[in-house]
Image (tube, grey):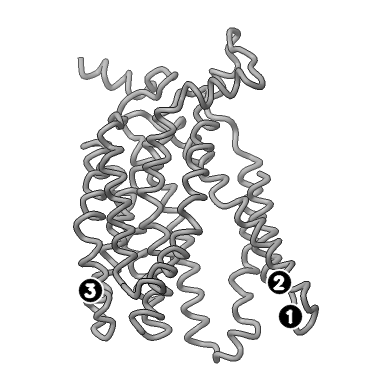
Amino acid sequence: MITILLMTVGTTMTGLIPGYSSIGVWAPILLLIARIFQGLSTGGEFVGAMTYLVERAPDHKRGRMVGFLPLGNLVGFVFAGLLVTALQAWLPAHDMLAWGWRIPLLLGAPFGVFALYLRLHIEESPAYAQVSSSADAPVERGWQQFRRTVVEQWRPMAICAALVVTSQVPDFMLTGYLPTYLKVVVHVGNTAGPVMIVATLAILMATVVFVAALSDRIGVKPIMWTGCGLLVVASVPAFLLMRFGAVFPLAFLGVLLIGLMELCFDSTTPAALPALFPTRVRNGALAISYNIALSTVGGTTPLIAQALISSTGNSLVPAFMLVFAGLVGTITLRFMPEVAGKPLPGSEPSVEREAGELAGS
């Protein structure tokens, strides 16, 4: 709940801050504070949402049901991308710089209030309620809680963190850096670049639930293996295609390849990562490993990519970053168990699964 408040306040505050000509040095100071609020709250509720949906879903339908979580993310990205693209196309450059850029930020206020309302009316999952209300549930504080949550879970936490790195590098490359890359390095038009990104995200939005449902049938690891293979093999060709900025279909194909890499992880990690941990420590252990890894590669991916291009003069450096992420994932998957269709650690098999097994026998 606190993270929703911080994100809402930070985003709305950014849209309301007067310019430097009005309040002087206070403008960048207030902007820094607003960005800190956003940074502290980024991804904060995503872990809880993953955990909640995973614990609610039947074992054999976990992928399909949890697949609606990344769908919600993609709907937000597409809506925001369409809004910004439309503002850039309709408003004169002067008006966009003067006040148009504030519109998407100010929309954060009503969306944040709605999200807060939903959060306050969500009950605990049955799996967590059963464990927490158990008569023999130990009361742990301090070192005991740290030992159970972190020390005893070091192996799944390491797997989780590595997979977050693998999945978030293409994610932030697509949404956080490619708009700049297409404009500054490839020199596409102000509208063409955002159109490629939004179109790619729309394709991901239309397919992510279906790929997530596929993981219930074939497992999450084959889809993740495919994503790692694309990262290693297709990253350099994708950026080579994007360099043909004057030929829209070729540049778009390069962007789409990056999107397909992201799709392989967006459709599987929300259902797979919580399933690595037992119920009693699931949310805490997942939040620590997920958010540390996310903060490591999230805001730094665009910054590192642009810094390396500027220092080396090699426009293919972002592709090498994606290759590295794919190698990290390839190594990690060798140690990750297949979790699709299996009961969550520390939980009984779901009622639907037991009924299906009895009917089958």
What secondary structure is marked by label 2?
Answer: helix
Q: Residue at x 59, y 19 (%)?
A: 132
Q: Can the viewer see residue 33 in this picture?
A: yes
Q: Label 2 amino acid?
A: Pro
Q: Residue at x 68, y 51 (%)?
A: 5
The answer to whether residue 286 is left or right of residue 264 is right
What is the crowding at mark 2: few (fewer than 14 residues within 10 Å), some, or many (at least 20)?
A: some
Q: Label 3 amino acid?
A: Leu
Q: Are marks 1 and 2 in contact (CB under 8 Å)?
A: yes
Of the two numbered discs 3 and 1 on the same chain, state the one appearing first in sequence: 1
Q: Residue at x 71, y 71 (%)?
A: 28
Residue at label 1?
Answer: 20
What secondary structure is marked by label 3?
Answer: helix
What secondary structure is marked by label 1?
Answer: helix
Residue at label 2?
Answer: 28
What is the crowding at mark 1: few (fewer than 14 residues within 10 Å), some, or many (at least 20)?
A: few
Identify the mark at residue 241; answer none if there is no mark: 3
Q: In the rendered view, tell whether residue 97 sits above or below residue 338.
A: below
Q: Label 1 amino acid?
A: Tyr
Q: Are marks 3 and 1 in contact (CB under 8 Å)?
A: no
Give the CA distance from mark 3 to mark 1. 41 Å
Residue most extreme to the right: 23
Q: Can the viewer see residue 126 in this picture?
A: no
Give how far across and how far down residue 281 sits, in percent: 52, 25
Q: Nearer the viewer, mark 3 or mark 2?
A: 2
Assign the C terminus to one quadrant of the image: top left
Give how far across and how far down residue 343 sits, in percent: 36, 23
Give the CA distance from mark 1 to mark 2. 7 Å
